[in-house]
Amino acid sequence: MSQTTGNRAVFLDRDGTIMEDSNYVGDVERVVVIPSAVTALQRLQEAGYKLFIITNQSGVGRGYFTHEAVESIHAHLDEHFGRHGVHFDRYYVCPHHPEDNCDCRKPKPKFLLDATREYGLDLPHCFMIGDRTSDIQAGINAGVPTILVLTGVGRETLAKREVKPNHVAEDIGAAAVWILKDKP
Ligand SMILES: [Mg+2]
Ligand SMILES: [Zn+2]
C-alpha cells in the first residue's frame, strides 16, 4: 500500500454543482446556492480536503458579462460560505469563448494540474465533482476520480452517457457522503 503524502482536494464545478445554473449567471442577485452545498463543503473541509472551484465562464468571452462580475459572484460565494466556516482555497476561471481554443477550458485538465503542482496535491486521492460531461472528462484527463451530480444539467448529462463517472450522486451533499464513507 502506498502512503498518502500529498494534500487531498475536491475540485468543484460551480454552476449546477454548488449554485443553481441559470444560463450565464453574471449577476450576484441571481446566485442561488444549492441547499446541501454548505454542509457538504463543511464536512469535506473538516476531513482535510482543500476546495477548488474550476469554472468555465464563457459568458465573459461572449461579452455577456465582465470578469469583474464573475469576481463579484465569487466574493458573494466567499461571504455566504465563509459565514459557515467554509473557505475556497482558489477559484480557477476560464473566461474564454469555446472557439478561442484556449488551454484552460474544461474538459482540458490544465487547472486541475496547475493546482496539483501549486498545492502539492495527491491526485488519486482527490475528486472532481460536476454536472456536465466536460467536468467528468476534465477529471478523467487529470487522472482524478469523478462524481456526476444530478443537479444543474446532471440528469441530461447522465442520459447522454458520453463519459463514465466513478460515481453518480443526487447532489453535492450526497457526493460528499460518498467521498467520506469509510475514510479515516
Ligand atoms: Mg456546471
Ligand atoms: Zn480558457
Image (cartoon, rainbow, N blue to C red):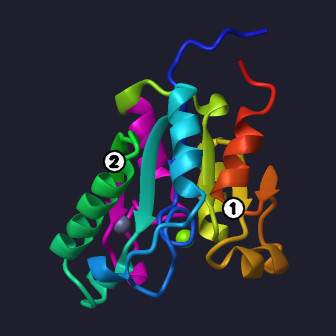
- Quarter of the image with the C terminus in it: top right
Please name the residue shown 33% across and 46% down the image: 82
Please determine whether, in this image, residue 134 is positioned above or below residue 41.
below
Residue corresponding to mark 2: 83
The span shown in magenta is 92-117
Q: Residues within 10 Å of mark 2 (few under 14, many from 20)?
A: few
Question: Magenta span has 94?
Answer: yes
Instruction: Name the secondary structure under disc 1.
Output: loop
Relative placement, left or right, of 158 versus 98 is: right
Q: Amino acid at mark 1?
A: Asp
Dividing the picture into quadrants, the one containing residue 32 is bottom left
Can the viewer see residue 100? no
Dividing the picture into quadrants, the one containing residue 65 is bottom left
Please name the residue shown 76% across and 77% down the image: 155
Q: Nearer the viewer, residue 49 or 54?
A: 49
2 or 1: mark nearer the eye: 2
Residue corresponding to mark 1: 171
Please name the residue shown 40% across and 85% down the image: 24
Q: Amino acid at mark 2?
A: Arg
Instruction: Name the secondary structure under disc 2.
Output: loop
Where does residue 55 sit, x and y in percent of width and height? 43, 64
Farthest front residue in view: 83
Where does residue 66 sit, x and y in percent of width and height? 19, 79
Q: Nearer the viewer, residue 69 or 124?
A: 69
**Quarter of the rendered structure image containing ligand 2:** bottom left
Q: How many marks?
A: 2
Relative placement, left or right, of 142 versus 104 is: right
* Mark 2 sits near ligand 1, with its Cβ under 8 Å away: no
